[in-house]
Image (cartoon, grey):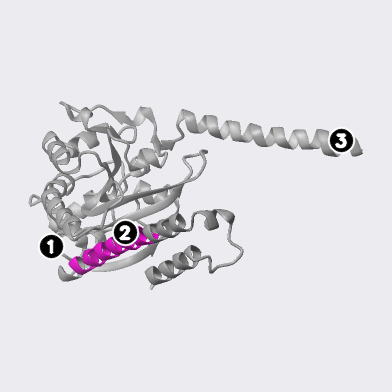
């Protein structure tokens, strides 16, 4: 229908049926007609491919028994990408938490101000994998210009932790002060090697009872991205669960005994689930959230914006208000 309307409009321009047109249209009617048709045809093709890809993504999710949500405003997940932005919207969300390989995946867009810089809209895709128990907030920034850097999320240099071997070529690790040993105990060399093989170029975050992987905006051309997410999650989940299942922050208060019911599968064989739940708490406040800060550029932009506003107000007062007094 849109194509028919475009052709009719182009024909009207070409035959000068539409009165009052700009002289450019009268001189070059054929050029305008061709451009209109080409632009609209390209738009229809692109829209059709995107819509078709999203439909195949949704169908593939439902075929596997996963839930699908087209839009999810303010998802409420604890990852930095969710809590550092405003107007965060998750789209094309696949919920596979009830499957044998539980995860949540989808696209993400939000407004990020970067602690003083001009707000910008940043889009990415994400995969969230549940963990057996709470862990400290640990972030691995990929060496590429990933989601967190594009959003202006900057982490304090004092929280930076050097990794063993060649892992610094692929990730920069940040963890709360005092949790360096905990981070290295979780991210052993074999886990880091698996991360390099499966998530190189992405940003990875551990927080609360979740592992997040943030990557470039997804391209839903077919159902292959979902198959890839399932395959990577299957490879990753066993290892990350093993590394975090018995984590215990001795700084934290013990969890209530009722929580032990959800931790039975993670309880070590040497003690009962009740004893394990009584001894194992969550994460202390010091390791609960990693600290973020503004970059030097963001601080300069924020200071310059403030000075500009003050200068404009001063100029207005001197030139407009003061002479009338």
* The C terminus - image quarter: top right
Instruction: Point out the tag, 3 or 2, that comes first from the N-terminus.
Output: 2
Q: Residue furthest bottom?
A: 1
Question: What number is the disc on residue 100?
Answer: 1
Front disc: 3 or 2:
2
Query: Which residue is found at the position 26% from the left and 54% from the top?
Result: 219
Residue at mark 2: 46
**Residue 234: % across, % down:** 12, 53
Question: What number is the disc on residue 322?
Answer: 3
Q: Which residues are magenta?
A: 40-60
Front disc: 2 or 1:
2
In-front residue for pair 305/244: 305
Q: Can residue 290 be seen?
A: no
Q: Secondary structure at mark 3?
A: helix
In-front residue for pair 52/294: 52
Instruction: Point out the tag, 1 or 3, that comes first from the N-terminus.
Output: 1
Compared with residue 33, is residue 121 higher up or lower down, i.e. above or below? above
Tag 2 near tag 1, CB within 8 Å: no
In-front residue for pair 209/261: 209
Within 10 Å of disc 1 (Cα), the crowding (few <14, some 14-19, many 20+) is few
Q: Is residue 27 magenta?
A: no
Instruction: Point out the tag, 2 or 1, that comes first from the N-terminus.
Output: 2
């Amino acid at each position: 229908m849109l194509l028919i309307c475009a052709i009719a409009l182009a024909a009207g321009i070409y035959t000068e049926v539409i009165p009052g047109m700009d002289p450019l249209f009268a001189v070059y009617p054929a050029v305008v007609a061709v451009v209109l048709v080409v632009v609209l045809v390209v738009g229809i093709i692109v829209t059709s491919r995107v819509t078709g890809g999203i439909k195949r993504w949704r169908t593939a999710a439902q075929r596997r028994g996963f839930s699908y949500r087209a839009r999810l405003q303010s998802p409420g997940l604890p990852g930095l990408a969710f809590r550092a932005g405003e107007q965060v919207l998750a789209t094309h969300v696949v919920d596979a938490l009830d499957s044998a390989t539980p995860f949540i995946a989808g696209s993400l867009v939000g407004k990020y101000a970067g602690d003083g810089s001009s707000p910008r809209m940043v889009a990415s895709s994400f995969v969230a994998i549940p963990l057996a128990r709470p862990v400290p907030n640990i972030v691995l920034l990929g060496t590429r210009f990933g989601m967190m850097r594009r959003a202006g999320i900057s982490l304090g240099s004092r929280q930076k932790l050097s990794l063993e071997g060649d892992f610094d070529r692929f990730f920069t690790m940040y963890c709360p002060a005092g949790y360096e040993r905990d981070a290295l105990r979780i991210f052993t060399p074999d886990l880091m090697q698996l991360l390099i093989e499966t998530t190189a170029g992405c940003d990875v975050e551990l927080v609360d009872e979740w592992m997040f992987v943030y990557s470039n905006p997804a391209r839903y051309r077919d159902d292959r991205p979902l198959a890839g997410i399932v395959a990577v999650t299957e490879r990753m989940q066993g290892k990350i669960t093993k590394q975090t299942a018995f984590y215990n922050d001795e700084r934290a208060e013990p969890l209530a005994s009722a929580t032990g019911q959800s931790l039975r599968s993670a309880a070590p064989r040497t003690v009962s689930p009740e004893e394990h739940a009584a001894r194992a708490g969550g994460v202390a406040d010091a390791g609960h959230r990693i600290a973020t800060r503004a970059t030097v550029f963001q601080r300069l932009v924020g200071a310059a914006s403030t000075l500009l506003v003050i200068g404009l107000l001063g100029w207005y007062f001197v030139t407009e208000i003061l002479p009338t007094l």
